[in-house]
Amino acid sequence: MKILHVYKDYFPILGGIENHVRNLAEGQAQCGHQVTALVTHPDSLRTNVAVEDGVRIIRAGRLATVASTPLSLALPWQLLREQPDVVHLHFPYPVGEVSQWLLRRGRATVLSYHSDIVRQAGILRFYRPLLLRVLAAVDAILIGSPPMAGSAYLAAHQAKLHLIPYGIPLARFKTRPTADELARVRQSYLPQPAASASAELPLLLFVGRLRYYKGLDYLIRALPEIPARLLVIGVGPMEAEWKALAEACGVSDRIVWGGEAPDADLPALYHLADLFVLPASHSSEAFGLVQVEAMAAGVPVVCTELGTGTSYVNQDGVTGRVAPPRDPAALAAAISELLADPSARTAMSAAARARVEAEFEQSVMVARVLATYQKLVV
């Protein structure tokens, strides 16, 4: 089968949807399918084509980026030249979605509805009429968690919805790194603090782009009440503001800003943590694949209840705790409760591993998606 994925970015650009597209595309290629990802070039007007881990990547020339949306005249032209069996759109990316709606490539069109558009309200007012046409035209809509079925934009399309949770290759996170690897990563990201007492504090880990909806500011505001250190892995537009907030809250000495970590370092970072925290503040955080990575490593998770997939992945009282969003006091209470109860963390660690193995393994996701394709192209 010839499969074409369409989105705005692809690895090495880091992000939840980017990681998902890569995991799905590589998994399909490993099953013997001809897989192409059509995305935009991160920093060039020119289009280039490369084969990476069995996937053909077309990076169409990018003119500019407006409200997190890459503008590319080359992308629809490249789409027109392709002859796939299935076009798999990854929403939200208006340029890709409208291009496929106009050009109608392939025998079937599948759309993964990853998240509502939350912050770009101005663009949404313009795009809404086209979005409704796109959703009506596609043959199937995939959602990663049950709460996403409640999106107002999907209300008229319930018959086309398919629940397929996101999956990742779990093995590299499940396997405990060697003592030497843990020591190397600890030295790189967690050099001994000047105050010896801080070295004995438990470690909280945050991994993600430093964007407004990640809610890291609420975790920073909670940190004065939490007896722990925080390691932040990621970069993004909020970095300077959040570092200033840490100074204002008097907790900068207990936060390590680790920057953008190489993919190879992530397993060890998870295994060094006592708790993983995803303090997301807005429903733009639709799932939180980083939770799956942490859970595969046996790390209990504290997340927030957004009405999205965050609390579907991390089950309150089973694999971790779920706190109200935008509430530093509640977040501090949930984290401190688990830090004070090692036996609860041990039980949650085992439950977390069991949950991801049952629901969030890459091969399970790939098989479910391919089965959906097959029903559409027979």
Image (cartoon, helix red, strand yellow):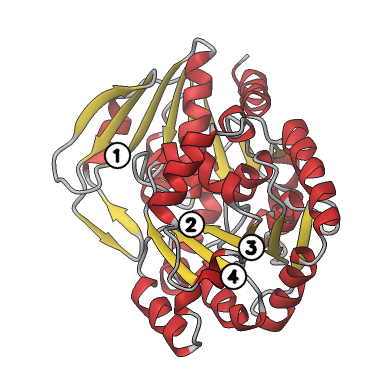
> Can you tell which of label 2 and label 1 is closer to the viewer?
2
Q: Are marks 4 and 1 in contact (CB under 8 Å)?
A: no
Give the x, y percent position of residue 117.
Answer: 52, 63
Distance from Cα at disc 2 to Cα at disc 1: 30 Å
| Numbered disc 1: secondary structure | helix
Q: Which residue is mark 3?
A: 202
Q: Which mark is first along the chain, 1 or 3?
A: 1
The kind of residue on which mark 1 rests is Pro
Residue 50 location, quadrant: top left
The disc labelled 2 sits on which kind of residue? Answer: Gly
The local secondary structure at tag 4 comes to loop
Lower position in the chain sequence, tag 4 or tag 1: 1
State the residue position of label 2. 208
What is the C-alpha distance between the residues marked 4 and 1? 31 Å
Q: Which residue is mark 1?
A: 76
What residue occupies the far top of the structure in this picture?
Answer: 32
Task: Report the residue marked by disc 4.
Answer: 282
Q: Residues within 10 Å of mark 4 (few under 14, many from 20)?
A: many
Marks 2/3: CA distance?
A: 20 Å
Q: Do the residues bearing badges 4 and 2 touch, measured as CB atoms within 8 Å?
A: no
Tell us which disc is closer to us: 4 or 2. Answer: 2
What is the spatial separation of the Cα atoms under label 3 and label 4, in whole angstroms? 27 Å
> How far from the left and from the top, in percent, is residue 370?
62, 22
